[in-house]
Each structure stands twice: as C-alpha cells, then as structure tokens.
Amino acid sequence: MKESVGTDLGIRSRYEQLGLEAVPGHLKTTKASDYIRIQAAVAVNAGNFLVPALAVLEGGLSFYAAVLCTMAGAAFAFFFVSLLALPGAKYGLPAQYVIRTMIGTKGSKYLASPVRSITSLYWFGVQTVGGTYILKELLERGFGLEVPFVLLSLPLALIMAYLAVVGFEAIKKVSRFALPVMAAAAVIMLGLFFTGTYDGLSASEAVADSGNWSLPVMVLFASLAFVQYVSGAGTSSDMARYAKSSRQAVTGIYAGNVLGFFITAVLGAFTAAVAGEWNPFVASTRLTESPLLIGAVAAAAFSSMIIINLNNAYTGGFSLLNTFPALGRIRSAVMFGAAGVVVSCFPVIVNDADRFISMLGTVVIPLTAVFIADFLFVKRGRLTPEQLSDRVHTSFNRTGGWAALSGVFVYLAVPDIFSPSFVSFFFTMAVYVIINRMNTDRKKVKVCA
C-alpha cells in the first residue's frame, strides 16, 4: 500500500494536476524574468518571421521601415495580451475558465473553447510540419542525412505532446535551454548573412538599398502584425496563473513578447532585404558548408518548434478541459496531444494553411475583441467573486454574441487591402462597449422611474 501511495505521489509531483481550479498561493512563484524568457523563446519561430519578411518582399518596405511598423503593431497587441493575463495572475485561473465571466459559461464552453482547441491543434500541426521540413533540409545539407518525413515529425510531435502533459514547469525548463540556443543561432545567422554577397552588394549595402517608407503600406503591415498576436489575449491567463504577482506577470509577459518579436522582426526583415527569402533558418545555412554552423541553426529551429508547440498544446489542453471538465487536466492534455501527433503526420495540412487560418480568424478576432472589451472597458479590469463562482451554468452573454457576429460580417465584407481583421477587431470592440453602455443607461432610467 505504501509503495502504491508513493508511486501515486510521484506521478502527481511530475505532472501538473491543477485544471480549472485556482492555483494556491504557495505555488505562485513565477517571476517576471521567467516570463520574459518564456515569451521571448515562444516568439522566435519560423511562422513569426513571415509578416516582417513580407513587409519587405511584397510591401516593398525598407528593412528599417518593416521592423519599425511590425514592431509597433505587435507591441500594441502585446499590450492587450499582457493585460488579459491579469485574471490568471490575480485569481490563479486558466484563460478559458476566466472567459466564462466575459461571454458566459455556454459561450465559453461551446464556442470559445472549441474554436481555441481547433486553432491550437491546427497550429500545432502546421508548426510541426513546417519545422520538420526545415530540419529535414538542414540535416540533408549539413550532414548528408536523408530522413523520411514521418520518422522526423512523429517523434517530434510525441516529445512536444508529452512535455505539454508535464505542464507549466516543462515550459519553464525548456525555455531555459531554448532561448540561449536561439540567441546564439541568431548571431550565427546574422554573421553568415554579413559574409555573403548579394548581386554584387554586401549585406549592409543590400539593406541600405532596400525598399521605401510608404506610410500606407507601413500601416497595413502594422495592422497585420497586430492581429497576428492580439488573439494571444485569449490564452495569456494560462501562463500567468503561476505568477508571483500581477505586476510580475504583466511586465514579464509584455517585455518577453516585445523582446522576442524584436529578434524575430530583425531576422525576418533582414533575410528578406538581403537574400530575398523569408526564412532565416534556411536562407542563412545556404551560405555555409560547415556542419557545426548548420547544426547550431538546426538546434535553434528545433528549439523554436518545441517551445511554440509546447505552448500550443498546453493552452489547447485547457480549452478542451473547459468544454469537458470531467476529463481532468492530465487526460485532456493527453487527448489533445494524441490529436496533435496524428495531425502532424500529414504534411498536406499546410497546403491550404492561408485559407484555413483566414477562416479561423473570422471567428477568433471578433471573439478576442469581445474578451478584451468586456474585461478592460466594461468590467474595468475587475472580476467579482460571484462572477468567478460561475453559479449560472447556462449563462450566455448575448451582447457579446451579437457583437462578435457583427464583427464576423465586417471581417467578410472589408477588402483585403484594408486589413479586414484589424477593422473587425476594433469595430467589434466599439459595438460591444456601446451596446453595454446603452443597456446600463436603460437600467438606470428604469430604476429612476
């Protein structure tokens, strides 16, 4: 019996047990420095190079203009992301449970959580498939190893799924390894770029010769960077619930995100300006035959994929748990991880990535706008014990539902050139706040009457 109890305690200590319940005070030990490291590591990944690179490649912006405008848009988004970490830090609750206070229990369990689960699952698959292709190419070029796709993607997905089951401590530990590796690789990649020549120009000359400072284009790409990251507000409480204090969580998450995106923007825009490509992991290694340097870049690509997908699987598991609370944290994480492993074995999922991501955005962006508007402008950043107790289990915030639906229609109606997701986000926020104030005024009139 004692051996059985000891084994059970060992399992419990190894894996994060807390699901939808609040994190007790003695476990809230994560500092701002931890969040800076975690968020910076999460931000530096292949998928995030795309917008800064496209600002140069398709927008025709200079390197400096591309970095400046995408940094501005991302930093604005991170402001909302960090503020939506407050409920997690203050009350120790996961994001999807907190969202029950914003759009109601029904809205959270049967709308927001399924959408978030599908989004996280899809990104898990896309990141794994994309990362596998990068690693496959680097292994072939650096070491002459031709590894079948599935033999790379399957073990990688299994590793990430397992780490997500371990929980938040795994994220902290992996980030301690991943960030230094990625920082060293960033220096190596920039060094390789500076040793190359591009149509007879050095890297510095190619950068100076690149692009323009078109203000409308800068605004467009700033808005694209904003909408790419603002949806993170729907999951930031998952990370913040173990924070030592609200201030530590908010400042750490904001600073880490900004630092990570700055590295990402510089690498992405620089690669586009000098090499005409968007992925520095691949483009930089074409400038060397050294297995050591290629191996260092491959290690960074591997680390970036692990940390971003660990984040996807961790938050996706909580979304699944919110819809099916009886599963418990471990089983929901295992089920999400298993689905992620299956999806990652089919590279075909990246073929229509743009279309599928756009479809998800039509719902995710308006919903995120409702979350932010409700918490910051309606509830003024405070949640009552009654709201957190969630006594009305059939509740649905109809105002939030109608506002989000109107945002979906705006998203579909606005031409791509005007960044429909950006317009939809602020339109939805405005509609939600205005309707709530009108309802409040009506109630005041009734009371006075």
Image (cartoon, rainbow, N blue to C red):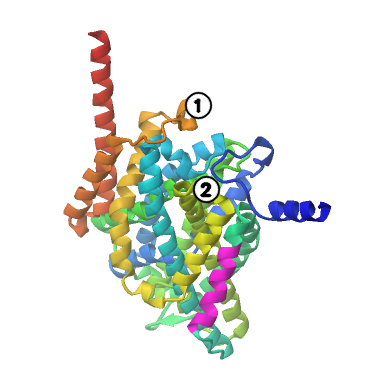
User: For the view shown, which residue lies furthest in the front direction?
Assistant: 1
Which residue: 33% across, 67% down? 54
Indicate left or right for 424 with 51 as reference. left
Identify the amino acid type marked 2. Answer: Ala
Vertical order, 29 against 384 (above or below) = below
- Residue 280 x/y as whole percent: 46, 73
- Between 49 and 311, which is closer to the camera in this rendering? 311
- Tell me if mark 1 has few (under 14), some (14-19) or many (20+) residues whose alpha carbon lies within 10 angstroms of its own: few
- Residue 293 x/y as whole percent: 59, 79
Viewer-side label of 1, 2: 2
Vertical order, 326 against 134 (above or below) = above
**Residue at disc 2, secondary structure:** helix
Q: Looking at the magenta stretch, what is its main secondary structure?
A: helix
Which residue: 60% across, 64% down? 162
- Residue 95 x/y as whole percent: 48, 44
- Residue position for label 1: 385
Q: Is residue 286 visible?
A: no
- Residue position for label 2: 326
Identify the amino acid type marked 1. Answer: Pro
Quadrant containing the C terminus is: top left
Q: Is residue 296 magenta?
A: no
* Number of residue marks: 2
- Residue 353 x/y as whole percent: 34, 68
Indicate left or right for 413 with 419 as reference. left
Magenta segment range? 149-162
**Residue at disc 1, secondary structure:** helix
For marks 1 and 2, the one nearer the N-term is 2
Q: Is residue 154 magenta?
A: yes
